[in-house]
C-alpha cells in the first residue's frame, strides 16, 4: 500500500534512528481512560477486561456467546490494538442479571475480567477520555540529548493527527479505483473508515509539507480534543489562542461525505488535494456517509521515557481516535514486528 504512516511527511525533522515495536505483546500496553461512576445498579454488567493478542470485536463475540445474548447487546467505548496487551471496559445488557446473581466469565486464554460492576446505562462509543500507552521500543540506538529535545518538542507542539497505518490493514489499495464493498457489515464499515482516513491524511500531508498543520484557516472549523465536535471561529481571541496552545482545540481538515451541515463543508484547497481520488468521494456520497471534520493537531500528554541498554520505555496519553504509531513516526523509522504477520487491521480508538 502506498501512503502508509512511514510515507506521510513528518513535522519535527528526520528520524533519530531505527526502532522495533511490538516484538512481544507486552511491548505495547494500552489502558483505556474510562472510569465508571459509582455502581448504580441496573441491567448493564460492566466488565474491565485485559486481553492479550486478540481484537475487541472477537472478545465482544466471546462475551455474547458466554452470556447468551446478541452481539449488539455487548458494547465498548473503542476498538483496541490486537497485537498488544490492552485493558478496556465492555458492557453487556442483562435485564434482571444483577438480581439473578449473574457472574462474569472465567479467565480465558486470551482475556480475563479484572473487575465488574452493575450500571444503569450501557457503554457508548467514544465515551472514554483517551488511552494510556506504555511501550517498549527495541534495537534503539539514539542520542539521549537528541531524544529529549525531540520529546520536548512533541510535548509542546503535538504531532500531525494522521490516521495510523493500523487503520488500513495490509490489503488496503490506495490507488484511485472503485472500491468493491464487502457484504459483511462490520468489514464494510472498516472499508469506509479506511477510505475516509486516507483522504484525510492526504489533506494533512499537504499542510505538513507547507508547515501549516497547526495554523487555523479563518473563518473555519476548530475541533475539540478527541472529538469531531467543534465550532466555526471567525477570529482568534485570547481564550481560543490558549485552547489551541494547550491542544484542547485544533484546526481541522475534512472527513469526506455528504455535507448536511454547511459548516462541515470542504474548502477549495481541501477539495483540490483530493482531486486524484474523486471516485472515492462519489462512492462515499453513494453510501450516504455524512461529512465531518477532524483535528489536524494531536496533543501528546504526560510523556515519560527511560532508556535501558538498547530498549526505550516510552509512555504517554492520547485522546480517543488517535494512534500511538503516529507519535513514534516523529521519533524513529519504525519496524512493526507484529504487522509482518498481521492478517487484519489493528486499531486504538
Image (spheres, rainbow, N blue to C red):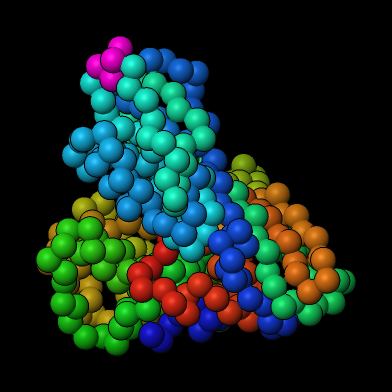
**Magenta highlight on residue 194:** no
Where 262 sits versus 69, above or below? below
Q: In the depicted view, which residue is nearer to us: 324 or 75?
A: 75
Residue drawn at x 28%, y 63% is 190
Q: Residue furthest top?
A: 99
Q: Magenta residues?
A: 96-100
Q: Is residue 238 left or right of residue 266?
A: right
The residue sitting at the right extreme is 145
Residue 98, percent from left and from top: 33, 16
Q: Toward the viewer: 32 or 274?
A: 32
Q: Quadrant of residue 334?
A: bottom right
Taking the image as drawn, is residue 206 in sight? no
115 over 184 or under it: above or below: above
Q: Could you tell me residue 263's position as x and y percent?
A: 32, 53
214 with respect to 18 (left or right): left
Location of residue 88 in the rendering, given as x and y in whole percent from the top left corner: 47, 43
Q: Residue at x 19, y 39 (%)?
A: 70
Q: Main secondary structure of the magenta part?
A: helix
Q: Which residue is at 33% across, 83% downward?
A: 174
Is residue 66 rendered to the left or right of residue 117?
A: left
Image quarter of residue 312? bottom right
Q: Position of residue 158 (x, y in %)?
A: 64, 61
Amino acid at each position: 500500500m502506498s501512503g502508509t504512516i512511514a510515507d506521510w511527511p513528518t513535522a519535527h525533522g528526520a528520524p533519530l534512528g531505527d526502532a522495533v515495536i511490538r516484538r512481544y505483546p507486552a511491548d505495547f500496553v494500552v489502558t483505556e481512560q474510562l472510569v465508571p461512576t459509582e455502581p448504580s445498579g441496573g441491567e448493564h454488567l460492566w466488565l474491565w477486561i485485559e486481553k492479550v493478542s486478540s481484537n475487541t470485536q472477537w472478545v465482544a463475540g466471546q462475551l455474547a456467546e458466554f452470556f447468551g445474548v446478541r452481539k449488539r447487546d455487548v458494547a465498548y467505548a473503542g476498538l483496541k490494538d490486537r497485537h498488544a496487551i490492552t485493558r478496556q471496559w465492555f458492557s453487556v445488557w442483562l435485564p434482571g442479571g444483577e438480581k439473578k446473581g449473574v457472574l462474569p466469565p472465567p479467565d480465558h486464554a486470551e482475556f480475563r475480567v479484572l473487575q465488574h460492576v452493575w450500571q444503569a446505562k450501557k457503554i457508548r462509543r467514544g465515551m472514554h477520555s483517551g488511552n494510556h500507552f506504555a511501550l517498549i521500543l527495541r534495537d534503539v540506538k539514539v542520542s539521549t540529548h537528541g531524544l529529549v529535545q525531540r520529546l520536548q518538542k512533541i510535548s509542546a507542539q503535538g504531532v500531525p493527527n494522521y490516521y495510523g497505518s493500523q487503520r488500513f490493514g495490509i490489503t488496503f489499495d490506495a490507488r484511485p479505483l472503485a472500491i468493491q464493498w464487502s457484504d459483511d457489515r462490520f468489514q464494510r464499515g472498516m472499508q469506509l473508515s479506511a477510505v475516509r482516513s486516507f483522504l484525510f491524511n492526504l489533506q494533512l500531508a499537504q499542510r505538513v509539507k507547507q508547515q501549516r498543520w497547526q495554523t487555523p484557516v479563518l473563518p473555519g472549523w476548530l475541533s475539540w480534543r478527541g472529538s469531531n465536535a467543534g465550532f466555526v471561529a471567525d477570529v482568534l481571541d485570547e481564550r481560543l489562542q490558549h485552547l489551541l496552545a494547550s491542544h484542547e482545540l485544533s484546526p481541522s481538515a475534512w472527513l469526506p461525505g455528504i455535507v448536511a451541515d454547511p459548516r462541515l463543508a470542504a474548502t477549495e484547497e481541501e477539495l483540490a488535494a483530493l482531486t486524484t481520488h474523486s471516485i472515492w468521494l462519489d462512492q462515499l456520497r453513494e453510501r450516504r456517509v455524512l461529512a465531518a471534520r477532524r483535528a489536524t493537531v494531536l496533543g501528546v500528554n504526560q510523556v515519560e521515557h527511560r532508556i535501558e541498554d538498547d530498549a526505550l520505555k516510552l509512555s504517554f496519553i492520547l485522546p480517543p481516535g488517535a494512534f500511538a504509531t503516529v507519535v513514534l513516526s516523529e521519533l524513529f523509522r519504525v519496524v512493526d514486528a507484529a504487522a509482518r504477520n498481521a492478517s487484519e487491521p489493528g486499531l486504538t480508538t
